[in-house]
Image (cartoon, helix red, strand yellow):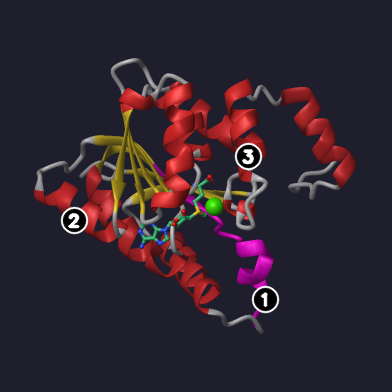
Amino acid sequence: MSNRTLSLDERLYTYLLDSSLREPEILRKLREETDCDDMSMMRIAPEQGQFMALLVRLLGAKRVLEIGTYTGYSALWMALALPQNGELIACDVSEEWTGVAQRYWAKAGVGERVHLKLGPAIDTLDALLAAGEQEEFDLVFIDADKPNYEAYFERCLELVRTGGLILVDNVFWDGTVADPDEADESTVAIRAFNKARARDSRIWLSMLPVGDGLTLAMKKGPGGF
Ligand code: SAM
Ligand code: CA
């Protein structure tokens, strides 16, 4: 027994997957196709996808925003958990990677509810704000270029409703955030982002050791509730 989070060795991780993962066939196929790509380490882990799908259901989410889509694996987990009339807006700059995503979204029958916005995500978020989409999203997943995390977060906090969730991926950045000798641009940005969230009174906060570290930030209402 332990009263601190266990690190997962190979045996325990396999046990976790064997005893809890319910990855639909279409997601397994997308994961396997993605894993042929050199950048496949960018996709989330399947147990994280299942957890995020559960959060979509828990919130009763109808509108989800994703920043950083790659081949669409995380988006597909969330889109499948949305109701028929739900919507997921997926932001990315890569036509090639999101081409794979669109093929799988269509195959999975969620093509109608996923809307891809190609272009720098800052521009897409600014356009959503200019269109009056403040407080219109139930859940946001931030997983694009790390130096822009703070800029994404500020905009997403306006776009998400009170009581809605912002999920932020890779907050451990392979453990480098805790290494004082590591000073690459992404590590420094994530470290600063994590520090700012620790004292951010606008949110309820939890940093979970899921995947490469996942922060959950729930937006408080005007009275701090
Ligand atoms: N969420 C995906 C998943 O788990 O399968 C992985 C996303 S991957 C870590 C990051 C993605 O962000 C890449 O597909 C990349 O093209 C995209 N990206 C990088 N810079 C961007 C920017 N400025 N605006 C929008 N997307 C960007
Ligand atoms: Ca990620």
For the residue labelled by badge 2, is the local secondary structure a helix, a strand or a loop? helix
| Front-lying residue, 5 or 18 | 18
Going from the N terminus, do you reach mark 1 or mark 3 first?
3
Query: Does any portion of residue 68 appear in the rendered image?
Result: no
Q: Residue furthest top?
A: 84
Q: Position of residue 9 (x, y in %)?
A: 86, 47
> Label 1 near label 2: C-beta < 8 Å?
no
Disc 2 to disc 1, C-alpha distance: 34 Å
Which labelled disc corresponds to residue 179? 1
Which labelled disc corresponds to residue 126? 2
Residue that label 3 marks: 33
Q: Residues within 10 Å of mark 1 (few under 14, many from 20)?
A: few
Q: Amino acid at mark 1?
A: Asp
For the residue labelled by badge 1, is the local secondary structure a helix, a strand or a loop? loop
Quadrant in the picture for the N terminus: top right
| Front-lying residue, 113 or 159 | 113
Quarter location, residue 171 = bottom right
Q: Position of residue 219 (x, y in %)?
A: 32, 44
- In the image, which is nearer the foreground, mark 3 or mark 2? 3
